[in-house]
Image: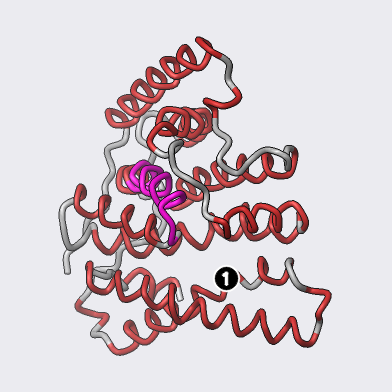
């Protein structure tokens, strides 16, 4: 499996094919499975919807396996999915700096989406998280970062980086990541976070670093939903941080983000490339 993934380097058209398969065929597969299990075990409604989430990735995986089986693999230089290199900063310091950086980036990008209304199905989803704490933890905090980062960065971005410029590859993979969420309220933050995760993956070639970023982001949202179920789904930092303190923290978050990203840029010297 790993050897096939290393040789599967999708261009933009192939990447969109994977996403469309996931959105349509994958969603149908998950829905049919949920429906069937619900008929057999009526009491499973809610938690089973969370645990069948990985099924949406089955159709694109089958396409990848079929494509690599049919292709002349010997003519393609394999590119590892995960080959970490953190430059002079090192792994430990990188992961330490990333933790507050995720919160800082969320803080300074929040004004771009705080004006948007929350889709009704998101509010339903939030209630399901609170009602099904264990299954939602596995789905939202564990499986989503693992599967979505393997799909969006480990497969799509890695492939695009061998076909086009890093800027275009990161932009397209981030746009695809946003589209996968199927609503503007999630798509815009996902796109913005995807830009950062795409840049990190390009510079470090570390799949675990972007899984870690995704884990922090989803884990924080999960904790807030569980601990404060009475908060509206669109509650942001602006709503809970009082007065001038909000702007002071905004300035601190902006300075921290610029400083850390600049330091990483100067320290990380490894990028993904391949000859096809």
Image x and y of residue 48, in percent? 71, 71
Task: Name the magenta segment's main secondary structure.
Answer: helix
Q: Nearer the viewer, residue 41 or 214?
A: 41
Q: Nearer the viewer, residue 117 or 30?
A: 117
Q: In this rendering, would 215 be left or right of 108?
A: right
- As for residue 183 lying within the magenta part, the answer is yes
Instruction: Give the residue at mark 1.
Output: 54
Counting the numbered discs, the total is 1
Q: Residue at image x 53%, y 12%?
A: 243
SS class, disc 1: helix
Image x and y of residue 51, in percent? 67, 69
Task: Tell me the quadrant of the picture where the C terminus can be found.
Answer: bottom left
Image x and y of residue 151, in percent? 42, 64
Image x and y of residue 134, in percent? 76, 57
Q: Nearer the viewer, residue 274 or 113?
A: 113
Snapshot quadrant of residue 65: bottom left
Q: Residue at image x 33%, y 82%?
A: 68
Range of residues picked out in magenta: 182-198
Q: Residue at image x 21%, y 61%?
A: 162
* Rendering colour mode: secondary structure
Q: Residue at image x 34%, y 87%?
A: 69
- As for residue 162 lying within the magenta part, the answer is no
């Amino acid at each position: 499996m790993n050897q096939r993934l290393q040789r599967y380097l999708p261009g933009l058209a192939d990447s969109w094919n994977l996403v469309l398969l996931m959105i349509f065929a994958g969603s149908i597969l998950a829905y049919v499975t949920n429906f069937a299990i619900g008929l057999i075990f009526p009491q499973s409604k809610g938690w089973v919807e969370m645990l069948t989430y990985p099924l949406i990735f089955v159709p694109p995986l089958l396409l990848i396996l079929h494509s690599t089986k049919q292709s002349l693999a010997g003519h393609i230089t394999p590119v590892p999915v995960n080959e970490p290199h953190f430059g002079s900063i090192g792994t430990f310091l990188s992961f330490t700096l990333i933790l507050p950086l995720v919160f800082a980036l969320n803080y300074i990008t929040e004004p771009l989406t705080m004006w948007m209304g929350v889709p009704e199905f998101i509010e339903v989803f939030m209630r399901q998280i609170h009602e099904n704490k264990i299954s939602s933890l596995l789905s939202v905090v564990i499986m989503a970062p693992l599967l979505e980062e393997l799909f969006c960065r480990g497969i799509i971005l890695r492939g695009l980086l061998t076909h086009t410029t890093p800027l275009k590859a990161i932009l397209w993979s981030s746009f695809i990541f946003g589209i996968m969420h199927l609503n503007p309220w999630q798509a815009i933050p996902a796109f913005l976070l995807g830009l950062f995760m795409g840049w990190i993956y390009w510079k470090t070639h570390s799949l675990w670093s972007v899984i870690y970023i995704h884990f922090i982001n989803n884990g924080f949202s999960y904790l807030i939903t569980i601990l404060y179920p009475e908060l509206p789904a669109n509650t942001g930092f602006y709503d809970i941080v009082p007065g001038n303190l909000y702007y002071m923290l905004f300035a601190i978050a902006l300075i921290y983000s610029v400083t850390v990203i600049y330091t990483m840029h100067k320290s990380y010297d490894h990028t993904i490339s391949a000859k096809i």
